[in-house]
Amino acid sequence: MNERRDRVLFLDALRGLAVLLMMEQHLGVWLWRGPSPGERTPTLLLGFNALGGMAAPLFVTLAGCGAALAVSRARESAGAMDLRSVRRGLVLMGFGYLLSWLTPSWFTTRSWFVLHMMGFAFTLTPLWRRLPTGGLLGLAAAVIAATPIVQQWMGTPRMLTNDRMALKPPYEALAGGHLRVALLEGQFPILPWLALFLVGMVVGRRVAAGDFVGIRRLAKQVLAIGVGLAMIGYAGRYAPGLGFLAEGGWRRLVGLPLGFFPATSAVITLLMGGVLWLVVFAAAISERAPIDGRSWWVCLGRASLTLLLVHVVLFRELTRPIGLWQAMSAEAALAIIGAWLLACVLLARVWARVGFRFGAEWLLRRVAG
């Protein structure tokens, strides 16, 4: 297996966790027919769905880590390094638009999914890398603070439907079109999800410097802010005289809706805190017991882009014409989820022997460098 010796394997393992969580959540929603009248949602499926919410935050944050690590290890000129970052971002965005085109039941070419978000952020790495660490954190905080203000100004609904995020009828003529979706109203818009990428760059810098104490300190601070915002939101719902916190722009700041379409400032900060603690724990585990580059977590992580693309097309789009879309019992759905995840693990382990040749990651390296 052709493998760089300077790979940070615990970050690869976290990518493996992210794609695992994403796939199990998606398959549970796309295969299960839902509860019958009077039937409760199975606890296992409900738990899978909740855990899957960490997948996209992990992907975006780890993309920022990767961008910072690439900068720290670059041996070419600044101009060549910047060009490579831009190429990488454009290829990721290209994958995003390809996925939109291949999955018309979910997206349109004006949708903005996690690959678009990561590609956009990567494209601007030449700008981000020139900011000091304090500047990156300050900009991330500004992005989170600006989000509820811009949402309120643009009249973003408190809950976004798939059709609105994809600008399908009757929303195809919505003012701002694709730019509005990309900035504010897609699945993972720039506001507030860029903040996770920027914080990921801070984490990447600290990983490169071996400053894991600094990462732990940042994780504590971010989680404390998220919990603080959530407690203010809770007070707005139940404390006398604080009902205004559950209304308008305040609700967009401190509210805790079940989903994150769109994400409030409290939700995005809590997710960020959770991701940072996962990084802390993964780094600690790696320090105590070094991770094998052939472990199934790492192999899944190194094939995560391919698995993301394939599972969406296969289970979101191709299940429809054969009658499997939301047609299964909970037990059957869980069996297929388990079989699919096991197949992915085995395939990734075998594929690693040839450096994941011809996969999306291989193509990204070939084009972007």
Image: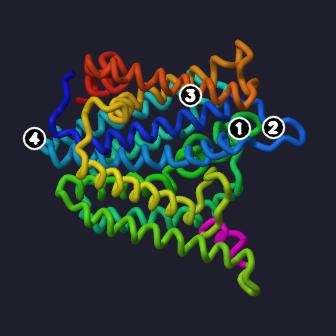
Question: What residue did someone put label 1 on?
Answer: 163
In the rendered structure, which amino acid carries the disc numbered 4? Arg
Give the Cα separation between the discs numbered 1 and 3.
30 Å
The quadrant the C terminus occupies is top left
**Secondary-structure class at tag 1:** helix
Q: Is residue 364 above or below residue 231?
A: above
Q: Nearer the N terminus, badge 2 or badge 3?
A: 2
In the rendered structure, which amino acid carries the disc numbered 1? Asp
Q: Nearer the N terminus, badge 1 or badge 2?
A: 2
Query: For the point 34% across and 29% down, which residue is it?
Result: 299
Query: For the point 40% across and 37% down, which residue is it?
Result: 16
Q: Is residue 96 above or below residue 117?
A: above
Give the Cα separation between the discs numbered 4 and 1.
45 Å
Residue 210 % position (x, y): 18, 57
In the rendered structure, which amino acid carries the disc numbered 3? Gly
Q: Nearer the viewer, mark 1 or mark 3?
A: 3
Question: What residue did someone put label 3 on?
Answer: 338
Q: Read off the magenta span.
A: 244-253
Give the Cα separation between the discs numbered 1 and 2.
23 Å
Q: Nearer the viewer, mark 3 or mark 4?
A: 3
